[in-house]
């Protein structure tokens, strides 16, 4: 007789896990479907399925909106930060799928694998954002990073894409390793990997000034800064953003920031509030450096993707402000800003992608006269860039305002001054792009020569532009799919509408306070 | 029925509507929209009650509730005439653009759309009663001009306009941080944050921070005007913009900066103003002298007007920072006058340059008036306005400012400033004579201006004459609000003098015409007649409750908004010292005087 002992299975909250399961399970399904031989299946069904899974993730997250609790034995938290993470990442994913229609990368890397990797990366981001545990956080980080390394290299026949994937792999691994060292030291100092447990250990054992903990925090900051591309750990960003296929860049720029900033909020505000006198000023200095380096670096860029890469370094600096102050208001401000950033960047990348497909390169020259050729695209990128700069009337202004409020409230007014100086510098290069977009082709020489100062080397694309060279080695296809225009328009309208009526989104983001009971 | 929101959003709506119209019709849509806005603002001016110092036509809704920013609009003595100036200016420029190629060309719809956005933003900045809302509109109003210059401007315009935007933004963004800091610092613990100007005035901003907060606001406004030494963007920016756009930019936008001082900086940051007042005064005086000197030596007609604007705005700044009612009302009157004169002057330059082969260099012009008599008459009237000929309202404005300076900061300042008036005569007449008289220039082809141009030019001329004949309404409308604006800072600098000033200001509300300039209070009978002026209730009909100084039966005034509007509240004790930090003024004894007059 064999007595089967009843296995004691852990309690699994399937409902709470459902968005994550939608993403990870969806990736398996998409991978399988991508093996089908028919072209219609690969070109049509696979992207449609991917969209469906992203939409399902958003829907399930909204379904779970009022739930609070933990998942997987307290490895993940089911709370507003997790849910906002899902929504932000999935919206970015939808944008990426739309931009990938008809693009070279899915064709070359095979649709099934490309889209499956997008879903896995999204799943990893969700795990990273929801992690309440050092190990889970690291798991999420790796799960999001490795697919992105592969995706960056997915335009197999383009040297730059392969190069960017390689660079991202090497630098990203260094970042992950650093983060792991930091986590190990934090574990060593506190004896637990659970965030709540760490906070309790710090206050109980008076570890606020413990050198091992401080070292761990420092390494963790460096590792996270690598991932969020905060200066001075941003060196990989321009090359990787420029080399990777544009839909992948768009996804990386937006979704990774969502996940990383939320993960940072959790780590610093849930696990380490007791040590805020250490990491607060340190993060503040990093943020200040990021704001200045990012904005100044973008000034001389001819390639639009490089310019947006540097600008995203600066934007990461702005977003860090909410983490720096260590208050609930700061967390709200950061989450709101990162969501606004997703929308604005989506619009900008959509237009750049369209321009790249039509001209074969992503240089600023390709945008000249866009106002006449494609007025809708021109309007979308105008609104997007003005939003990133922080012009009133766009959601960027409201989001920046919230950040400034949280910064002043948290006692970091000097950082706010640097923030506005950075914004002021950013207007120079954003306006330079807009000047090109809205001038006519006959005025090209005028604009190119005139904008030669602020916007870098001008002149016809074919000439050698030196280090900022943008090789026209991509295939050009004249027709831009309607999906790209849809992304540009929807995102552009959202930027303006949210800028004029920010109330609903702001009120929704206020729920983030529930995730952070331990701080003010 | 009259809602400020309609006036605010009408230009934007018209601009968006114009996008749907066929290209040829775009300018007519814009023109009709512009005239509608003028009609609306005239209605508001006529409906304005000069006697009450309260906010009128108040609109108050939540905008960003989580953040304490409200959509608060109101018409006050400070902004009512500036609103009219704005709508008239934009309508004038729209009419002008309708006669040019750009207004009829392929991109006409975009042109008028950006104009609509700009007008909405300017009106929003003028109407706003919430600090963050003000800054939002203030920042927004610059960007349409960027697009207008890039698309329709002249020469090497992209670096010029980027320079202009960045210069202005340095100040504006610093002002944003300062505004958030004001909101945060003024909020007592546990209370929700609020950015409404009235609420912050009641709560008070901590003294220690007022210095740097004021410096940030001053940076923003002084760059916008521009004032020496922040005028680096002026020359290139003015040369790059198309003339109709420039007329509005120079005539209207710079006034928003002066208004911003009176709206926000002076009432909310009195100690900061008192500390840094002399820095601003010296900068203003240097602006006057520097601007005037360059204006009378440069040969580019546009730059003559550009630097003359620097000088005139310097005067306006002096008026504001004299911290006297006269100075402040003079500044507001000058804002209106200068705006109107500038519209005419830039149109004249456009007409002149058309007759000089497209050149705007004075050396290429000359003798154009020989075949253009009507144009010459109009131009000379505009010139007289610019140089503040006695008889024009500009003269009146400058007298008020000088009087404010004399009684306020220093007599020496008034003397130096009046040098500026003399220099204005030189550069204004020089511009006129060199372009229109003497020998016909090498490139010049004198001929009469077209009917459309004459009709357009007639508008500022008629306004100049109208203001010259009857400037009182502008002064009366501004009087109470201007006193309230400068009183807190004046009280910090010199409480006794501030007291006296407040009493005199209250008395002057009962006077009419030139009797307002007598030092002695007018006899009771004078108060009985009130000429038409702006509509609204004659002030002496408002009975004042002696114990609180509040009007007992406010007539025609909008309901009091929130806690204690800008009405009359107790402030002074026997020694003439200020009790509390409020800017509300007018005192028991004065109320009794009025009451005595009434009974």
Image (cartoon, coloured by chain):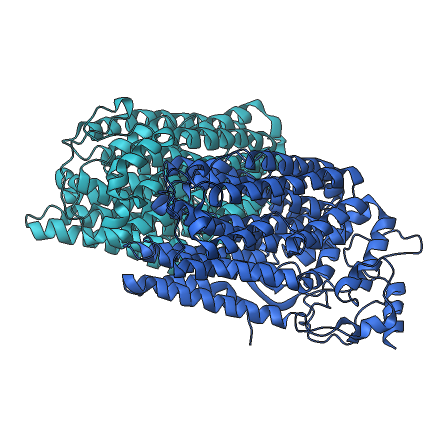
Chain colours: A cyan, B blue
User: In the image, what residue occupies the spot 36% across and 24% down?
Assistant: A174
Please state if B407 lies on the left or on the right of A432 as rendered. right
Up-down relation of residue A266 to residue B263 (above or below): above
- The front one of A237 and A191 is A237
What percent of the width, then of the height, locates residue B375?
Answer: 47, 55
Furthest-right residue in view? Answer: B574
Q: Nearer the viewer, residue B375 or A361?
A: B375
Residue A240 percent coordinates (x, y): 29, 30
The answer to which quarter of the image holds residue B530 is: bottom right
Q: Quadrant of the N terminus of chain B?
A: bottom right
The residue at the point 85 percent across, 65 percent down is B522
Q: Residue at x 89, y 72 (%)?
A: B596
Question: Is residue B512 rendered to the left or right of residue A152?
Answer: right
Whether residue B10 is visible here, answered yes or no, is yes
| Residue A134: quadrant of the picture | top left
Can I make out residue B145 in this image?
Answer: no
* Quarter of image, res A253: top left
Residue B93 in the image, given as x and y percentages of width and height:
44, 56
Quadrant where the C terminus of chain B is found in the figure: bottom right
Q: Position of residue A112 (x, y in %)?
A: 16, 45
Instruction: Report the front residue among A44 and A403.
Output: A403
Q: Identify which residue, A508 or B504, lies in the foreground.
A: B504
């Amino acid at each position: 007789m064999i007595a089967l002992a009843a296995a004691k299975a852990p309690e699994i909250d399937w409902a709470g896990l459902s968005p994550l399961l939608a993403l990870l399970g969806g990736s398996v399904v998409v991978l399988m479907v991508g093996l089908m031989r028919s072209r219609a299946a690969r070109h049509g069904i696979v992207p449609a399925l991917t969209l469906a899974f992203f939409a399902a993730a958003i829907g399930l997250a909204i379904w779970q909106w009022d739930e609070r609790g933990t998942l997987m034995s307290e490895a993940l938290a089911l709370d507003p930060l997790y849910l906002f993470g899902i929504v932000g990442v999935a919206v970015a994913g939808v944008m990426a799928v739309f931009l990938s229609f008809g693009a070279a990368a899915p064709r070359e890397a095979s649709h099934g694998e490309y889209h499956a990797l997008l879903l896995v990366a999204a799943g990893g981001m969700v795990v990273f954002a929801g992690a309440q545990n050092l190990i889970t956080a690291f798991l999420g980080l790796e799960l999001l990073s490795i697919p992105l390394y592969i995706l960056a290299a997915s335009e197999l026949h383009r040297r730059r894409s392969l190069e960017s994937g390689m660079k991202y792999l090497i630098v990203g691994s260094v970042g992950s390793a650093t983060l792991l060292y930091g986590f190990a030291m934090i574990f060593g100092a506190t004896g637990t990997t659970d965030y709540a447990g760490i906070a309790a250990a710090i206050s109980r054992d008076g570890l606020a000034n413990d050198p091992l903990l401080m070292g761990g925090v420092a390494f963790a900051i460096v590792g996270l800064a690598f991932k969020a591309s905060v200066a001075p750990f941003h060196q990989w960003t321009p090359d990787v953003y420029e080399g990777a296929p544009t839909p992948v860049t768009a996804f990386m720029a937006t979704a990774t920031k969502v996940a990383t900033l939320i993960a940072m909020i959790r780590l610093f505000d849930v696990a380490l509030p007791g040590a805020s006198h250490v990491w607060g000023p340190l993060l503040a200095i990093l943020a200040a450096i990021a704001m200045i380096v990012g904005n100044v670096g973008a000034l001389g860029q001819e390639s639009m993707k490089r310019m947006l890469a540097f600008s995203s370094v600066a934007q990461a600096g702005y977003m860090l402000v909410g983490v720096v102050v260590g208050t609930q208001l700061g967390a709200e401000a950061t989450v709101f800003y990162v969501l606004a950033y997703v929308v604005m960047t989506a619009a900008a990348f959509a237009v750049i992608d369209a321009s790249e497909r039509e001209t074969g390169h992503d240089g600023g020259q390709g945008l000249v006269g866009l106002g006449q050729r494609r007025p809708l695209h021109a309007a979308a990128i105008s609104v997007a860039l003005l939003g990133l700069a922080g012009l009133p009337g766009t959601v960027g202004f409201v989001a920046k305002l919230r950040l400034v409020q949280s910064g002043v409230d948290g006692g970091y007014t000097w950082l706010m001054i640097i923030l506005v100086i950075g914004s002021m510098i950013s207007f120079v290069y954003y306006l330079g792009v807009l000047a090109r977009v809205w001038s006519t082709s006959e005025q090209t020489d005028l604009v190119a020569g005139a904008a030669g100062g602020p916007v870098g080397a001008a002149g016809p694309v074919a000439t050698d532009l030196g280090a900022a060279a943008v090789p026209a080695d991509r295939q050009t296809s004249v027709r831009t799919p309607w999906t790209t225009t849809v992304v540009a328009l929807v995102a552009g309208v959202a930027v303006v509408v949210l800028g004029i009526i920010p109330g609903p989104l702001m009120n929704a983001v206020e729920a983030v306070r529930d995730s952070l009971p331990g701080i003010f | 029925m009259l809602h400020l929101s309609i006036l605010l959003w009408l230009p934007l709506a018209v601009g968006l509507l114009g996008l749907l119209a066929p290209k040829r019709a775009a300018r007519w849509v814009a023109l009709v929209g512009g005239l509608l806005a003028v009609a609306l603002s005239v209605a508001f001016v006529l409906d304005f009650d000069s006697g009450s110092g309260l906010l009128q036509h108040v609109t108050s809704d939540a905008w960003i509730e989580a953040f304490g920013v409200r959509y608060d609009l109101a018409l006050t003595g400070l902004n009512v005439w500036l609103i009219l100036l704005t709508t008239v200016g934009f309508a004038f420029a729209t009419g002008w653009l309708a006669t040019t190629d750009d207004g009829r060309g392929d991109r006409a719809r975009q042109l008028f759309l950006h104009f609509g956005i700009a007008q909405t933003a300017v009106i929003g900045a003028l109407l706003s009663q919430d600090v963050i809302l003000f800054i939002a509109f203030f920042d927004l109003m610059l960007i349409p001009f960027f697009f207008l210059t890039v698309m329709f401007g002249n020469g090497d315009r992209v670096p010029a306009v980027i320079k202009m935007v960045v210069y202005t933004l340095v100040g504006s963004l610093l002002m944003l941080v300062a505004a958030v800091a004001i909101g945060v610092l003024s909020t007592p613990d546990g209370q929700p944050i609020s950015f409404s100007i009235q609420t912050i005035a009641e709560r008070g901003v901590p003294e220690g921070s007022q210095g740097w907060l004021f410096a940030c606001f001053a940076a923003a406004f002084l760059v916008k005007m521009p004032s020496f030494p922040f005028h680096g963007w002026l020359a290139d920016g003015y040369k790059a913009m198309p003339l109709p756009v420039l007329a509005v930019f120079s005539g209207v936008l710079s006034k928003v900066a002066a208004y911003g001082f009176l709206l926000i900086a002076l009432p909310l940051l009195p100690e900061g103003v008192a500390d840094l007042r002399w820095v601003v005064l010296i900068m203003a005086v240097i602006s006057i002298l520097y601007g005037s000197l360059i204006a009378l030596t440069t040969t580019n007609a546009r730059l003559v007007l550009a630097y003359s604007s620097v000088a005139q705005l310097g005067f306006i700044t002096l008026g504001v920072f004299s911290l006297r009612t006269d100075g402040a009302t003079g500044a507001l009157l000058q804002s209106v006058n200068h705006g109107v004169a500038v519209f005419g002057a830039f149109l004249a330059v456009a007409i002149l340059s058309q007759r000089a082969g497209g050149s705007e260099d004075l050396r290429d012009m000359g003798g154009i008036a020989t075949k253009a008599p009507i144009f010459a008459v109009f131009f000379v009237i505009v010139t007289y306005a610019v140089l503040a000929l006695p008889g024009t309202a500009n003269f009146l404005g400058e007298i008020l400012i000088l009087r404010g300076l004399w009684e306020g900061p220093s007599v020496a300042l008034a003397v130096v400033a009046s040098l500026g008036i003399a220099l204005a005569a030189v550069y204004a007449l020089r511009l006129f004579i060199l372009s229109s008289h003497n020998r016909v220039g090498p490139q010049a082809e004198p001929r009469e201006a077209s009917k459309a141009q004459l009709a357009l030019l007639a508008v500022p001329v008629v306004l100049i004459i109208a203001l010259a004949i009857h400037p009182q309404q502008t002064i009366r409308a501004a009087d109470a609000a201007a006193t309230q604006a400068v009183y807190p800072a004046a009280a910090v600098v010199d409480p006794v003098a501030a007291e006296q000033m407040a009493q005199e200001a209250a008395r002057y509300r009962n006077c009419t015409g030139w009797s307002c300039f007598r030092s002695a209070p007018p006899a009771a009978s004078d108060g009985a007649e009130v000429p038409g002026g702006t509509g609204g209730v004659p002030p002496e009909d408002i009975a004042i409750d002696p114990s609180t100084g509040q009007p007992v039966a406010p007539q025609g005034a909008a309901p009091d908004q929130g806690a204690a509007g800008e009405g009359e509240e107790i402030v002074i004790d026997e020694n003439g010292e200020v009790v509390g930090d409020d800017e509300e003024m007018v005192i028991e004894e004065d109320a009794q005087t009025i009451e005595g007059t009434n009974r």
